[in-house]
Amino acid sequence: MSAPTVRAPEQPDPSAVADPVLLDVADGVGILTLNRPHRLNAVDDRLMARFLERLDEVADREDVRVVVVTGAGRGFCAGADLEVLGDLGTGEQQVAMPGLAYLRARALPKPVIAAVNGACAGLGLVIALTCDLRFATPTAKFGTGFARIGLVAEQGLAWLLPRLVGPGNAMDLLLSARLVEGEEARSMGLVDRLHDADDLLGATLVYARALAAGSSPVSMGVIKWQVQRSLETSLEQAMDDADPLTRASLVGRDFVDVGSRLRARETPSYAPLPAGSPRLGDEPPSV
């Protein structure tokens, strides 16, 4: 009698069992980690839905004043998962567009910093550009990718990219879909700071914790609104916006409290944004 065939137990798909976006909170900073390292954190429906949930969560947590977004393993986010693109590549499916969902980080009334630790392409680049600052390693690779697979500049990339790198650089990156590494990315304005791979997250957290400890959450939310609005309006409008906001801040809780603490030779501190604070929109946050 022949021995029975022994089949190895099926291994679970890691993408199906792991939380696709991890959250760790300490010292006023919430770290969101895209967690599909076996796929270079490529975007599928589950990861994007969880990412949006996590953004809403940190927006409403009073113990989070600054948000850091990074990737597990050796990549930040390699773009849309090729398996998902393969399913769409028959040309038979109608796809519902997500609208403003991909831009949700811009609506948070808190600073959001991308710590780009590796590949950052396609939809991953969109995620990074919706953050307020981008710190990266010298070997991190950035690319748009869309033109090489017959797609267009997705999810607001045609608006976001020129405002960071200028129209010429944006056209180059979009038309050629070439990859640029950290130093070139910084020289064109795509990246704000470079750190060695071993230091990237630690250096980003040092910066984020300094903001969390030393800057008013209300001020940071209003400033973020002002800068975003200035990209769409004139200098005169920016002045008109700033005047009432300045008057309100001069009698606001944080400014008055700082003054009294400094006069008493005490270290200033700031109250957190209350849970449920409105997302950034057409109107500025309350000072």
Image (cartoon, rainbow, N blue to C red):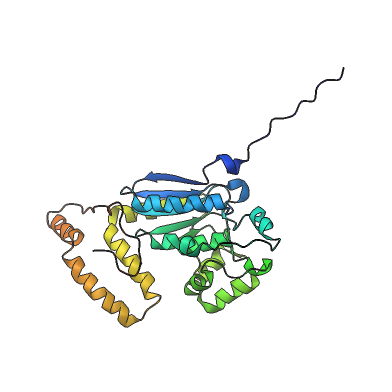
Q: Is residue 106 left or right of residue 212?
A: right
Who is closer to the viewer here, 218 or 15? Answer: 15
Q: Position of residue 57 (x, y in %)?
A: 39, 49
Q: Is residue 51 left or right of residue 109?
A: right
Mark count: 0
- Toward which corner of the image does residue 270 lie, by quadrant? bottom left
Res. 281 in view: yes
Q: Quadrant of the C terminus?
A: bottom left
Q: Position of residue 117 (x, y in %)?
A: 53, 54
| Location of residue 169 with respect to 42 vertically, above or below | below
Q: Is residue 259 left or right of residue 63?
A: left
Q: Is residue 281 left or right of residue 3?
A: left
Give the residue at x 36% y 73%: 229
Q: Quadrant of the N terminus?
A: top right
- Specify the farthest residue to the right: 1
- Toward which corner of the image does residue 106 lie, by quadrant? bottom left
| Location of residue 11 with respect to 42 vertically, above or below | above
| Location of residue 76 with respect to 249 vertically, above or below | above
Res. 197 in view: no
Who is closer to the viewer here, 1 or 246? Answer: 1
Give the residue at x 60% y 72%: 174
Q: Position of residue 258 (x, y in %)?
A: 18, 58
- Toward which corner of the image does residue 222 lie, by quadrant? bottom left
Q: Position of residue 236 (x, y in %)?
A: 31, 82
Give the residue at x 54% y 41%: 18
